[in-house]
Amino acid sequence: MVRINELNRCYRVLGLKPGASLDEINQAYKDLARQWHPDRVPQDDSERQHEAHEKLKEINEARDLLRSCHAKAGAKRNQTASKSTASKSTASKSTPPTPPPAPPPPPKATPPKANYHPPRANYQTPTAAQPPKPAAAQPPKPAAYPLHPYLRSSYYAAYETQTSPAPEPKSPYPQPQASDYPAYPTQTPTHQVPKYQTPQVPKYRGPDLSGSDFQGANLKEKDYANRNLSDANLSNADLSDAFLHNVNLSHAKLFRAKLFRANLLQADLSYADLREANLMGADLSGANLSGADLTGARVGINNRLMVKLTGANLSGTIMPDGTIHS
């Protein structure tokens, strides 16, 4: 049975946290195997060749042990799931089927009610005496015989004066006209709604290490990814196999620094001092080396370039032979 300490050591070898998934283990193994492959080490350096072989052997053992543990854990989970389903099926077989519910009893017959209604007494509640309402004015009935036109008009005119309401008195003040009011705007004024601005996320994480003094420090295999080391003094520092992904080393002093197989993917090395630095096996893909000084830096053996510079920015960079890259 594998001990927990042995599993934690395997996770540390692959640079993972305990409990990582199988996909993360495979990805970490691929990255480390590519980094420690003996073909990336100079053939004439026997010490580095031996170190690469030992490291690759340790990585393979850690990967195999973690894979076997994950396979055993998956088989145990499948076994427990099959046992639970089998127990459920046996329990369902052992219990007898429940009988169907009994039908409800038929409703009881009720005798029909007799359609008998007692006679209502013609009794009215006495009300208080109310005053008689005035009769509405009725128009005069036309005469049985025709009237003279003059008499007819005077006859109906007398009735209209009695029934028509009195006209309202005119106000002595002038009435407002529609032209006295200001014209209402037909279009509503438009206003601009401010756009939502995405909050700025800091580019670098961790404490700010700009201007720090690491001269001659042993920083081998350290993780300074996404850290701000601008204007830092790293002269003669050992940064072999360090993880410096997306690090800010702008205007930093790296005179005679050891960057052997360092991961400087997308790092900012603009105007950095890299004179006589050891860059053998370093990965500078996508890095910004504009204005950097690489005079005398070790980048290959026998005119063979041993540095990965895919997509790197070399505008204005002083190359190891002293020429300026255009």
Image (tube, rainbow, N blue to C red):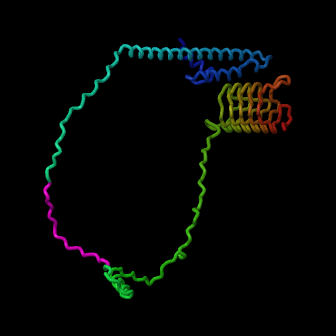
User: Is residue 50 rendered magenta in the image?
Assistant: no
Q: Is residue 321 above or below residue 115?
A: above
Q: Residue at the spot x=16%, y=42% of the render?
A: 114
Q: Is residue 61 above or below residue 124?
A: above
Q: Position of residue 269 (x, y in %)?
A: 74, 36
Q: Position of residue 115 (x, y in %)?
A: 18, 45
The single residue placed furthest to the front in the displayed view is 145
Q: Is residue 121 above or below residue 224?
A: below
The single residue placed furthest to the top in the displayed view is 1
Rendering quarter of residue 63: top right
Q: Position of residue 318 (x, y in %)?
A: 82, 36
Position of 291 with respect to 64 (left or right) is: right
Position of 17 with respect to 301 (left or right) is: left
Position of 109 with respect to 226 (left or right) is: left
Q: Between 318 and 115, which is closer to the camera in this rendering?
A: 115
Span highlighted in magenta in the image: 120-139
| Residue 278 visible within the image | no
Q: Between 324 and 34, which is closer to the camera in this rendering?
A: 34
Q: Residue at the spot x=19%, y=39% of the render?
A: 112
Rendering quarter of residue 247: top right
Kindly report the secondary structure that dominates the magenta region of the rendered protein: loop
Q: Position of residue 91 (x, y in %)?
A: 38, 15
Q: Residue at the spot x=44%, y=84% of the render?
A: 172
The C terminus is located in which quarter?
top right
Q: Between 262 and 231, which is closer to the camera in this rendering?
A: 262
User: Is residue 136 rendered magenta in the image?
Assistant: yes
